[in-house]
Amino acid sequence: MSTRLAFGGRRIDRTKPVEFRFNGKRLKGFAGDTLASALLANDQVMVGRSFKYHRPRGIVASGAEEPNALFNMGKGGRFEPNQRATTTELFDGLSVTSQNHWPSLEFDVGAINNHLARFFPAGFYYKTFMFPQFAWKHVYEPIVRQSAGLGRAPKDRDADRYEHFYAFFDVVVIGGGVAGLQAARAAGAAGAKVLVMEQTADWGGRAMVDGGTVDGQPVAEFVAETLAALEAMENVTLRTRMMGAGVYDHGYLLGYERLRDHSPDAPGPRHRLWRIRGDRIVTATGAIERPLSFAGNDVPGVMLASAVRDYIVDYGVSPGDRVVVVTNNDDAYRTAIAVRQAGLAVPVILDARLGGGGALAEEATKLGIRVETGMGVARVHGARRVEGISVCAQAGEGAVLERIACDVVAMSGGWSPVVHLWSHCGGKLVWDEAQAHFRPDGDKPPLGADGAGFVVPAGAANGALSLGAGLADADAAGRHAARDLGLKPAKSAAPKVEDAPESPLEAVWLMPQGAGVKLRMKAWLDYQNDVKVSDVQLAAREGYESVEHTKRYTTLGMATDQGKLSNINGLAILSDALGRPIPQTGTTTFRPPYTPISMGAIAGEARGETFQPLRRTPMHDWHEAHGAHWEPVGQWRRPYCYPRGEESHAAAVAREIMATRESLGLLDASTLGKLIVKGPDAGRFMDMLYTNMMSTLKPGRCRYGLMCSENGFLIDDGVVARIDDQTFLCHTTTGGAERIHAHMEEWLQTEWWDWQVYVANVTEQFAQIGVVGPKARKVLEKLTDDDLSAEGFAFMAWKDATFGEIGARVFRISFSGELSFEIAVPASHGRALWDKLLAAGQEFGVTPYGTEALHVMRAEKGFIMIGDETDGTVIPQDLGLDWAISKKKEDYLGKRAQARSHMSDPNRWKLVGLETVDGSVIPDGAYAVAEGTNANGQRRVQGRVTSSYFSPTLGRGIAMGLVLHGPDRMGEVIEFPGTDGKTYSAKIVDPVFYDKDGEKQNV
């Protein structure tokens, strides 16, 4: 049985007992325990059920690679599924339940799947649920949905908070083992600003368990001395409980810091997501021990050899009284020695190598441990825990030579460097035949923008598995990173270690090597998803030769551990089945994050009211105080209208329109996007972005422009003002500012990276007020001495002006068809100018108006609105905007796409105006029907309404729409069936309903 030892446990504090609950049972551990070590200390060997066959599952590992020990953790707002016991630090009051069983862990109805396993081989999902067809919806799908998933989804709102943190470092070292600490020391001593992150709460990594001597002192003292040296460096930052989650382009790195998981009642955020820029990234992420594939290697009590000694040395926990060690390498002998030194029995070490081990094997023999070479495990006996093993010759087919009673099997199939972070951003791997693993190819690192490698592997993560080799490699990595930054590394020697001689590893992918089908069907590769050796071999026989296809067909490596234990063994089995070398088979794709990170950390503070922060203009409070009815526009809230008393919204809109057309209206236009494009190549850039020519625009002038995607579709429009020879101010739609800014940056960074252009989004830095109507000039003349006359200030021009003490930029542009000025001032002066305009406009009956009045007035003038007249499939030519497309330019974004046959099809719907015969308002979005039906028996359509309003100016309903051959059908009446059962008859007319000659904007 597994139990707590009376001594040992370097990471626990026996003076601080901790109480926790597992499936309702009260259990005890110590401060410093992980949930996994505490469960083993309480003889809780079976901790869960596998996904497909519901087989009993026990703890296999001691770190982030653990596939089995996943729990529902916490209650209420702190409930979280699929939490890994091996990385969860024990705390008082912790409550967990096991997953994927019913009604209980010990008695699980789903275990019937294990007896039906022959009917559920790899890929059965793709073969089983085909017939009868009707059964999918009513039988198969409900069963599959009920069976899917492991833990339960949380139901309550998360009670914790999370945050994001932004940081910049010269060198980021991922991993706090001896290699990571040495690399950080070398880089820090050279003067680099260094961040060191370690995913556990403990520094030193495996060396603290395995021991050794560095520079003549125990490795623990070396770690303490190195930590002290790093802490004394002001340029070095050390963080524990922080995982390197992913490496991305340009030295961008995500770090995941767990601040309060071990102390949930402490103040502050629970998790912190670090967004880091590092000039050089050192991956000292260590290596993961591989399991061996033999029949019954999933029975609770079969563990990685390194995990067994971790629990003994770190936590003072005995996983069992009689431990059989099975291995193909020398490292596992350390486990046998640790078990014996803890006073426990080691009946035998089964070494698959005929030649046996080196110095460690000799030490084990001196301790009286029996060693059998050339031997393996035929099968493990037991169901819910290990009861014994059958021994066989590794070179044979599984004939049993001996049965040995035991309660733990410690297995080791070699070590695989953790290459995930190296690979995230394109680092290539090379197969190391001697050590039977993939390691980083130093000649093909992830490349930065300068073409140089920016990720440097170190220690075991680079294939240097011994203590001495790892430290030497890490020291060189730290110095390499410093030199890349132009720094001079200190003149000091790498730490000296005398590694004991070891015998070479021999690759063992199946035990025994000639195992028959009955043994292969019980030899597990992926413990969580129940993928067996026979499943991968079946996939190969069925033609799945790509490792990526095999992964998806069998679900190998698709569990929550993402194949950390299973992938190398699986691809080796696949390679053998295909008869080709492992390097030719390759690996699956390594994707971030390295281990799962919480959704809360991804969201950070973006939750509740801050999920999408409400953006307010400087005049927001005035609007609210004067009864504005709000309309959401992107992240902004804009006044839809300003109803007075019992006035309806429709009446308020009509009043605002008539007041503006007859006298004076004010519009808060601050939300419109404002992007500054600046630089020597700004004109060239603008010509590529817009369909018309912008480089010829003179400073002080404005021009209306259209912007298309590379697919030719219209994505935004707005007025562009040229500020000086190298500076343009681009106005965008309210909802488009961030999107268009990103669009510009994408092209600058990916296509025209060598152009000298800078783009800044200054939308919130300026308030903008539209002063509109026949009295607009008169009210402004009361506030400024600057010349705003028709002769001194032409249409589509801008100029600087002063309104009292407020400096402003005034644009003579109009979206209403009336005389109009748009005044931009620093946001801090927006409310003051608004108040001045209201006061000065009293004698003219000034009327603030909202977005609906704006929309109606623009429709009366036939002006398009992005999002109304466009839907992602519309091009400028559809809207009659050919005049805004330059015929002089060789190219612009979308030009080639618009030349495609579909885009130039004469049958594309074109923009027209629509007037209902009876003056009513056509429902927005209504389709115009044509004669006949289509292939589906539906009425043919010949157009649709894009905008529809009641025009108080004209006293009737007006609409704009896209209609087949519309401009050629003026005066024709077409029908629009409404959803209210009524059919609307409308005449096709010119889209400009009001002041077609544009005289009113020039009064």
Image (tube, rainbow, N blue to C red):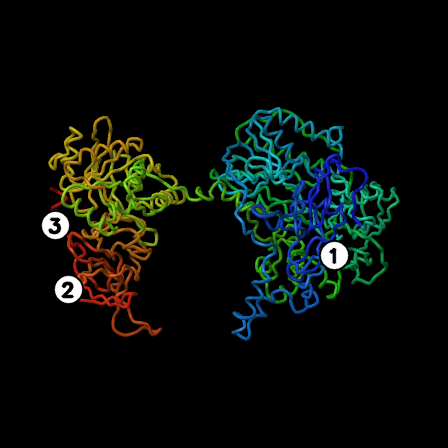
CA gap, disc 3 and disc 2: 20 Å
Q: Position of residue 71 (x, y in %)?
A: 64, 50
Residue on which disc 1 sits: 299
Specify few, some or many for label 1: CA neighbours under 10 Å numbering under 14, 14-19, or 20 or more. many
Q: How many residues crowd around disc 2 within 10 Å: few (fewer than 14), some, or many (20 or more)? A: some
Q: Position of residue 24 (x, y in %)?
A: 69, 51
Look at the image and tell me in which quarter the C terminus lies: top left
* Label 3 with label 1: CB-CB less than 8 Å: no
CA gap, disc 3 and disc 1 = 86 Å
Give me the C-alpha separation between circle 1 and circle 2: 82 Å
Looking at this view, is 378 or 453 the one in front? 378
Whether the residues at callouts 1 and 2 have beta carbons within 8 Å, the answer is: no
The correct choice, above or below, for 109 with respect to 473 in the image is below
Drawn side of residue 621 relative to residue 26, left or right:
left
Residue type at mark 3 is: Asp
Q: Are marks 3 and 2 in contact (CB under 8 Å)?
A: no
Q: Amino acid at mark 1?
A: Val
Q: Which mark is first along the chain, 2 or 1?
A: 1
Disc 2: which residue:
971
Front one among 805 and 838: 838
Dot 3 surroundings within 10 Å: few (below 14), some, or many (20 or more)? Answer: few
Per the image, label 2 sits on a secondary structure element best described as: loop
Disc 3 marks which residue? Answer: 997
Instruction: Looking at the image, tell me whether mark 3 or mark 2 is earlier in sequence order.
Output: 2
Secondary structure beneath disc 3?
A: loop
Residue 148 image-quadrant placement: bottom right
Closer-to-camera residue (767/354): 767
Decide: is 763 above or below 969. Answer: above
Q: Is residue 895 left or right of residue 537?
A: left
Picture quadrant of residue 987? bottom left
